[in-house]
Image (cartoon, rainbow, N blue to C red):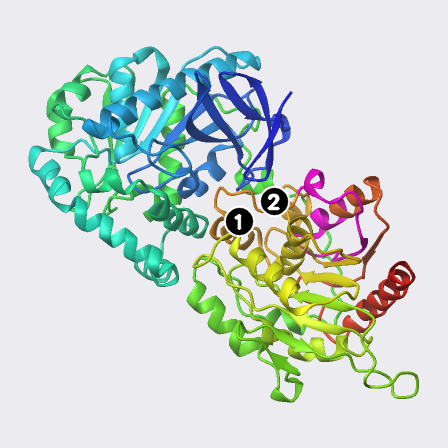
Amino acid sequence: MKYQIDNSYVVRQVHTMMFFVAAHWFNTPIGHDLITFCLLLNEVAMLSVQIAGSPLNPAIVLTHGVTDNAHSQADLIDHLSPHFQVFAIDTLGHGTSPAFSAADLADPFEAAATELTATIKEILAYRMSVGALAEPLIGHGHSMGGALLSFVAHNNPEFFRLLILEDPAWLSPEQQDGYLSRGPDMADRYDGMKADPVQALAECYTERPHWPVTEFAGWLNGKFQVDRDLIRSGVVTFSKPWQEVASSLTVPTYIMTSENPDTIADHQAIAAIGNPQLHIRMIANAPHSVRREDTELYHQILADIFLAEGIASGKAGNRTTTEISRRVNTAEPYIDPRLSPIIEQTPPQTPWDLVSLRAGGTRAFTPSTRYAPDSITVNGTRIFNAQHDADTQADTEQPSVTIINIHGGGYVAGSAHFLDEYNHQLAKLPARIVCPDYRLAPEYPYPAAITDIVRDINELTGDEPLILMGDSAGAGLAWSVLAQTDRPIAGLVLLEPAIDPTLSGRSFSTYADGPIWTRQAAAAAWQLYAGQSPSVATMQSLRPQLPRTLVVVNPVDPLRDEGIQLALDLTDAGAPVSLHMLAGTFHGTMKDPVVSPQINAWISELIASIEPLNC
């Protein structure tokens, strides 16, 4: 079978009609641990789909509104995946699905509906191939996604057992004219958001404080990914009168809307149709994004609908999302009392509010100027010369190694100068320290940071042995750079590494709320950094000769298990690996004076072990 990388998940070609992820369906963690597969028809890639949950459960298909994507429904997927197998689709021209062709743009909605129909057929075939129950699907669609699902159900009623349409784009002629006239301006607006994504994210966070924090990153990425030709066309629904489609629906269809003038669907006109399959559920004062405004109430209404329609829960039964996603931990984890003040001193980790996150980091982590580097490049990379012991080495002697020390910050925050004090100490090993000030996401998503670090390696180092080192996201970048540079790498130091965008380790359930780094923060940061791109190095892509590696993890850290697993994988691949875990540490403590002397001692041992190999 053929393997390829798709969003850092291994994708197996099953046959010419479908790609799906070779993964553990029956134990798929919820949250953002979504499995991506691409559907193929006649060997031409079609729509991108993310799946979560077990095929033993009933299936639900999610379609998003215009300019959104599958990931922008993260909270809904999180809620549904314990009870259903969820298929979240990037519709045509959205997310990582293909753009509209010139022929498609003659009738964009018809083209999108055709592709969605083919995708749903493949989902039904896939369900049958894995032994799922042979039953129709549940469909949930928002806005344009609601119009698409209703149109597909109008033409293919056998696909569905139930439709839930969140303020569907069933537009009056006047509303359609409004979309058509605003299309070009909307395209320009989204281009502006792409030019300043931090400001766009901050405005969304301020204007929509009730939204689930897990959906801001997907919302923003959707604006970057959407096909601008579609937006300029202004077409978001079918050309025929919506009443013709609504009156023909033969499956139970629930319309979720409100009296708020921001909503689209005219609930009075819908009621006047008289189709007994149409049921209206009003959510007071909710705007167009009905679900996001009050997710708790929305989820309760969904539960009532499923009960009314006789749809039983899946194998997860009636357990809540929290009960399923987190292990019961009856004992408080041990925290070293000398480190506990760090929890209060560290600013909240909010990748969905980058302005606050970055400003808080600057206030909390800017060191004293007395630790200034020996030189700073035009790109902001900071260089510390080795501090030799005068009793054993001349000051003019070349350092034994250069350490490329990469700062953390979830790929979206942090700065090289935050590490000045630590790098000042690290240079005493002795070692020359090069600390890249790489570009940050989302302004510069993957692979910009990797490109910057490889550039610094090429420009700022010579023939001396090199050690790649990083903390958290910095360790993830060190791991990725290892696969991208053609320079010999003698050693690898990975401190609390963030390398797994699937968040699949057990520790991401046990310590979902931190301290400090959380599951929500990790999911949002990965989406802003990598989106749907391959974002981490894979074992297969690394050089045959793996370097000596030091991995240090914290016992109380959502990142703990991915670091341990990486150490085990490297060991099995033949690398010389040392793995350490210090009692009482948690995320963000590796540079603290309580911990760093031990870390530096292990790095010193690593340097001593590689020197003979480079004589």
The label shown at residue 151 is none
Marks 1/2 in contact by CB < 8 Å: the verdict is: yes
- Residue at 29% x, 19% y: name it: 152
Would you name the residue on which mark 2 appears? 503
User: Where residue 17 sits: x, y (%)?
Assistant: 49, 16
Q: Is residue 587 left or right of residue 242?
A: right
Secondary structure at badge 2 equals: loop
Residues 457 and 474: in front is: 457
CA gap between label 1 and label 2 equals: 8 Å
Kindly identify the amino acid type of the residue bearing the numbered disc 1: Ala
Q: Magenta stretch: residue 563 in it?
A: yes
Residue 30 in picture, x, y percent from top left: 55, 38
Residue 380: x, y in percent? 55, 74
Indicate the amino acid at tag 2: Leu
- Residue 523 - label: 1
* Residue drawn at the location 61% of the way across and 46% of the way down: 536
- For mark 2, does the 10 Å Cα neighbourhood hold few (<14), some (14 to 19), or many (20 or more) residues? many
**Quarter placement of the N terminus:** top right
Image: 321 above or below 372: above
Relative placement, left or right, of 299 versus 251 is right
Task: Evaluate whether residue 294 shows in this view.
Answer: no
From the viewer's perspective, is 407 left or right of 205?
A: right
Quarter of the picture containing the C terminus is bottom right
The residue segment tinted magenta is 538-565
Crowd rating for badge 1 (residues with CA inside 10 Å; few <14, some 14–19, many 20+): many
x then y, percent, for residue 18: 50, 20
| Residue 326 in the image: above or below residue 248 | below
Q: Judge by depth and name the residue closer to the eye, 232 or 140.
A: 232
Query: Does the magenta segment cover residue 297?
Result: no
**In this rendering, does residue 298 appear at all?**
yes
